[in-house]
Image (cartoon, grey):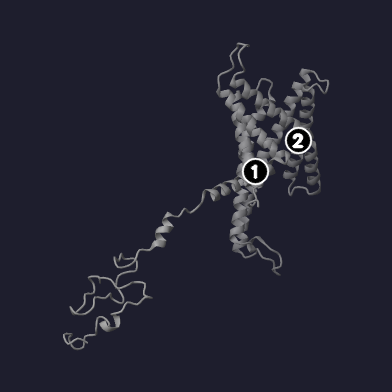
Amino acid sequence: MDSTTPPGTPPSEPPSSEMSLPNPSSPHPAQEPTPLHQPQDENSERILPISSPLPKDHWDPTRPKDISTKNEHHQKPYSSRSILKQHLSQSNDHIHHLNRLLTTTPTLDLILSTTSYTLALLSTLLPPSPSNSNSQPHLHHRLSSLSALLSETRTTLRLSGLIPIYTWAHSTYHSSPPTLTAHITTTTQILAGIAFQTLENLAHLGDKSILPLSPQRRAKYWRWCCRAWAVHVFLELAKLLLLARKRQLDADSAKVLEDENQWRDTDGAEMCPRDLPATTKQQQEQEAEETWWRDLKINLAYAPMTLHYSLANGLLNDSTVALCGVLASYWGLKGAWMRTATAVVE
């Protein structure tokens, strides 16, 4: 210790003899010291303090520059090749998803319905075609023709519609609905579906001159076909209202049973709603709620259309009919898209 140092004061730095040679393994070579730690003797060697009271991220002019950090800032996180690969993978997933929609007739009908009614709605917003026959077809006429073609394609695809109605009736017969009201409603819907599909097939085949039907009889078949459709739609609305009432009663009963601790069986072997995790029950309730609202919107959009087509002179204008069709088809297609959604296709 230097003689000028007061007695009892610990040395603020190691002896200069030990620090006179630079340590090659040290990350900080000997440089000019910081003003925080000045040497106490003019003859002593200028050295750096062993430890600094400043935080590690403090800027220190004696510290060498971190080249790796600089390189990280200039390095691109993703290359153009990886970005292109990621976009191609996402497009591949969407194509596979769309293929699952197109492989079944109901979902294909929803796609054609959405496209057909959208084109019909756009055609109603455009001015009509000019009366000059020598001019090229106007955009209004082109959209209307394409919409009619898609609608006719949907009708042709439904020629086999009696088969799924038969399977629906068969499953209903072997597993009857829980209540008498539900049984009567479902049976009436099945009969209305049979009448709808039979009359539509006859009218469509008559329009194509496959069946010898007069125009008056074909028009009559089309009207009664849409009336059967109206019966199905309004019964579906009634079923949705009854289902909402039943769910409310079940929720109240479940709350009472939960308060009385009567959900679990005495032996505890059977899985009851109380045994399900909270997240699973909430997810099931949320899915059921979304399905109920989606079905309600679809049938509310179809209801005025069924009344319009059931009357000889109609009830709505073309724009309103097309708008109702777009809304109903959109909600139906959205539900089909969610049902066919799966994990990423490898």
**Residue 67 vs residue 240, the one in the foreground:** 67
Q: On residue 281, which mark appears?
A: none
Q: On residue 193, which mark appears?
A: 2
In the picture, measured across the screen, residue 70 lies left or right of residue 186, that is: left
**Quarter of the image that includes the N terminus:** bottom left
Q: Position of residue 75 (x, y in %)?
A: 45, 55
Question: What's the residue type where badge 2 is placed?
Answer: Gly
**Residue 275 vs residue 85, the one in the foreground:** 85
Can you say whether 50 is above or below 156 in the image?
Answer: below
- The residue sitting at the right extreme is 212
Q: Kindly identify the residue that appears in the image at 59 percent across and 27 percent down.
A: 121
Q: Position of residue 94 (x, y in %)?
A: 62, 44
Q: Are marks 2 and 1 in contact (CB under 8 Å)?
A: no
- Counting residues from the start of the chain, the first of labels 2 and 1 encountered is 1
Residue indicated by mark 1: 95
Answer yes or no: is residue 139 visible. yes
Can you say whether 245 is above or below 318 in the image?
Answer: below
SS at badge 1: helix
Query: On the image, which quarter does residue 204 sit in?
Result: top right
SS at badge 2: helix
Q: Kindly identify the residue that appears in the image at 61 percent across and 28 percent down.
A: 119
In the picture, measured across the screen, residue 17 lies left or right of residue 129, that is: left
Q: Kindly identify the residue that appears in the image at 75 percent across and 47 percent down.
A: 177
**Residue 259 vs residue 73, the one in the foreground:** 73
**Residue 313 vs residue 38, the one in the foreground:** 38
Question: What's the residue type where badge 1 is placed?
Answer: Ile
Residue neighbourhood size for the residue with mark 1, other residues' Cα within 10 Å, grouped as few (<14), some (14–19), many (≥20): few
Q: Position of residue 222 (x, y in %)?
A: 74, 25
Q: Position of residue 215 (x, y in %)?
A: 77, 18
Answer yes or no: is residue 291 visible. no
